[in-house]
Image: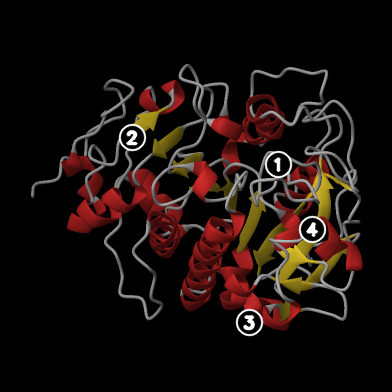
Amino acid sequence: MNANKNTPLITPRRHFLQAASALALAHGAAPPWARAAAASPPQKLLVLIYLKGGNDAFNTLVPFADPRYKTLRPTIALARDGLLHLNEKQAMHSALKPLLASWKVGDMTWLQGIGQAEITNQHYRDLEMQFTGAAADEYFSDGWITRALLAQPRNIRQPLDAIAFNDLDIREADPMGPFRGDKLRVLQLQQASTWVATRDIVKADTIATTAAKNSTIQFAQPEFIALNTKFSADTFSAALYATAQMAAAGIAPPVVHVTLNSADGDHHHAFDTHWDQLKHHGTALARLAEGLSSFRSAMQEIGAWDTTLVATYDEFGRCPNENSKQGTHHGWSSAHLLLGGKVKGGLHGQTMPLVGVGNVGGPEPVIDTRALYSTIIESWWGQNPNGIFNQRFKALDILKA
């Protein structure tokens, strides 16, 4: 194939690049921004993993020693003998076994009881709050990452601000999740595995922000290097594989966003577990753990694990008690993972109490999600978070200097 290294992002919003432009690096025709990025010191990479639908923390980080666990979950409580015990009271779901190595060496932490006050327990509004960093009575048009990256000095910003893999946001007008506002240079590749397999950005069903289309940068696909680390072939792992390859080539943007959904695209078959939870939840967690384990290994292999931070998030957790369909309805607090070479391993926050509620609800969060976002802004990016949110959140003590 012949590569046209002068192709800018100026064509229509969807299907805006030809496959040839995506192969520029593979033919040794790296554009100036890619060469400059590769020659610069390693850039810090933030990888956000969205667990679409709202993950059940109680069957992820399991409070097996609390007798109320079995009482509130008579059919979906996990047997303690099959769990991955972290201490005398808590354990991880057995599907998370690939992450045990990370837990044991201390580059993974659990954020327990993380969430946001006054949520509606409706996907659209609560996810909007997560994307924008708004309180219940606030409405922001820009995503929290949009505000944070735009506040950075121009001389340290990268030519491409972010890449989002897989489905992201149901809004048609601005489907960019935490990159909302159409001000950042962002590409959303809705078919990560297709892009990895074909190197064809058109076939990957790609969307570009106006800022990306109006820039003169070029999205060049690096020539994939041979890695000893093996990745599975599913869409989630494909996105993480592509991220590792971009990092190896020195052209990864500051932020990569990856959505983890079920293989069939139905979020009820992944984390939105209203029914048949035992049938689907473990499979979703296994894909998460396998993908993250491979990604960790690959980033260590290329010497970039210390400059990589991985954080999972969702719109809300699940209710402590199971419902009549052997599932869990929407809850309040959740538990999320943070991984990276600079992460302080362990358990952070407080064990989520098993409180009996109706079909919706649960314990109040003890960690505001915006405190995590503020930690990323302040402790990871070294940026003053003042003005990003309408109140100041103290950074969490979860990262090494």
The mark found on residue 111 in the picture is 4
Q: How many marks?
A: 4
Q: Closer to the camera, 169 or 371?
A: 169
Read off the residue under disc 2.
206
Check contact, mark 4 vs mark 3: CB within 8 A: no
* Tag 3: amino acid: Ala
The mark found on residue 186 in the picture is none
Q: Is residue 218 above or below residue 310?
A: above
- Give me the C-alpha separation between circle 4 and circle 3: 18 Å
* Tag 4: amino acid: Leu
- Give me the C-alpha separation between circle 2 and circle 4: 33 Å
Q: Closer to the camera, 219 or 30?
A: 219
Q: Residue at x 70, y 49 (%)?
A: 381
Q: Closer to the camera, 269 or 103?
A: 269
- Give me the C-alpha separation between circle 1 and circle 2: 33 Å
- Give me the C-alpha separation between circle 1 and circle 3: 32 Å
Read off the residue under disc 1.
329
Helix, strand or loop under label 3: helix
- N-term-proximal mark, 1 vs 3: 3
